[in-house]
Amino acid sequence: MLEFFSQKPLVEWCIVLAKFGFIFIPVAFIVFMITLERRGAGFIQDRQGPNRTGIPLFPFLSHIRLFGIVQNGADGLKLFTKELFEPREAHGFWFKFAPAIPFMVVFLSPAVIPWFGPMAFEWGGQLVQVSGSILDLDAGALWLFAFGALSVYGIVLGSWASNSKYALLGGMRAGAMMISYEISMGLSLLGMYILVGSFNLQNIVVWQETHAWGIFVQPVAFIVFLIALIAETGRAPFDVAEGESELVSGFHTEFSGMRFAMFYMGEYAHIAISSALLATLFLGGYSVPFVSTEVLRENSAQALAVVCGVFALGILAFLFMMHRYARWYKNSEASDKAIRLKEWALYKAVGWLFVPTLLAIGIASIYFANIINAESFAAALITAAIQILTLLFKMSFFCWLWIWLRWTLPRFRYDHVMHLGWIILLNVALANLVVTAFIAKLLTS
């Protein structure tokens, strides 16, 4: 056993263990998604969103609101302490176990997503190579499909265990949607498989990096895949499994407290995983636009300086907007004017601390550019960090797309959802697969 562990350098084992932290990214996105949804819904509906709840931190500042994040924390605390109601006729064990299934899937799905390119560097005279995913599987896309479909088992099981006709109808609808849209989703992925020749997500990203993003070579497959994923997550306009106007609250009608919250968090985490999959398959994954991994590794110090500069400019733009808004707010008749202006003053002070820090890091990276060569551990670490940030940015874009669609489109009727899945998307995915196979055969012959 000791000989097995001694075959690899300690730094490689540390990186392998650190990669397990990626399984918590969807959990972190839950907090991000809830805040983005509430503030985004307020923006789309021309209202403020959560902006009142705060926590006292300093004598001179009565409330810290963090742009609505404190409100989300208060709601989470409420769900943690709320009574766990259980219907008298419910099937006890399954009723308690069902909400855990969608949340457990969250910790399994990120294992095959490549968060950064293969890391290669010299350490102690040895060449160390580490993959960018926790599990580098040849059937990584199929792994995600399999575990993504498991979440619907929790919904169906919970609806049946509730012993409620409204919940059962919602669970049946969720199961029917999973069956209907999984087929179109799989067929749309086959087009990329024909082009790349592999279900390995790492190979798919490398192919896009050397050729073109999947959204350009498979635009029809991207649209089909996107619609099918939105239906898989059960979000509006495909939220017929909840359907408040028809089914009270659908499959989670009888759930309360943290049991309801686990369904709720599982849905947001599923959106994060779906966004990562979309970005990996069709937006080049971790790859930076117009910059290959090799070029990024060779110029890692300059790339770090650019990233620090971009973040510094973003913070400056945010501070400028806050300053302009504060001047307008100072002359308003708002009842919380004094509290809010003090809070913004604190945010400005924190922002002005970050800007010189980021600029100092960027200048230092350029100064030490000669020391950071392409084969060093520092170059590999900087490259991986930039690629992880790139993938997170693409995920955030798709998360906002999910929210935008929810608060823009009305809920579809159930028969319309089935018609879209079986009659339209299935035929479009089949036609796209045939055309892709025909073109690929012409190009290779």
Image (cartoon, helix red, strand yellow):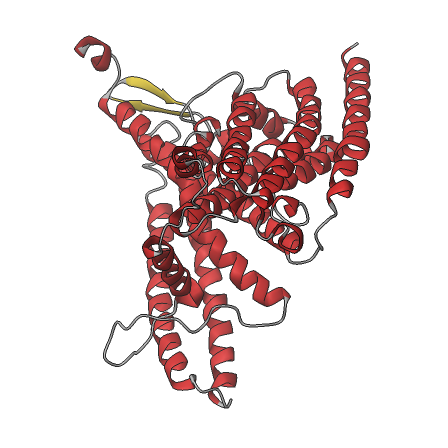
225 or 395, which lies in front? 225
Residue 91 coordinates in the image, percent (x, y): 44, 35
In the image: residue 437, left or right of residue 74:
right
Give the quadrant of the C terminus: top right
Q: Quadrant of residue 207?
A: top right
Residue 276 coordinates in the image, percent (x, y): 53, 37
Q: Is residue 121 above or below residue 317?
A: above
Residue at position x 62%, y 40% in the image: 169
Q: Is residue 173 above or below residue 356?
A: above
Residue 215 coordinates in the image, percent (x, y): 69, 36
**Looking at the image, which residue sits at the far left?**
2
49 or 212, which lies in front? 49
Q: Is residue 286 visible?
A: no
Give the quadrant of the N terminus: top left
Q: Is residue 189 above or below residue 163?
A: above
371 or 252, which lies in front? 252
Residue at position x 51%, y 89% in the image: 332
Task: Give the tally of numbered discs.
Answer: 0
Q: Quadrant of residue 232?
A: top right
Q: Is residue 164 above or below residue 323?
A: above
Q: Is residue 330 visible?
A: yes
Residue 325 coordinates in the image, percent (x, y): 51, 78
Q: Quadrant of residue 119?
A: top left
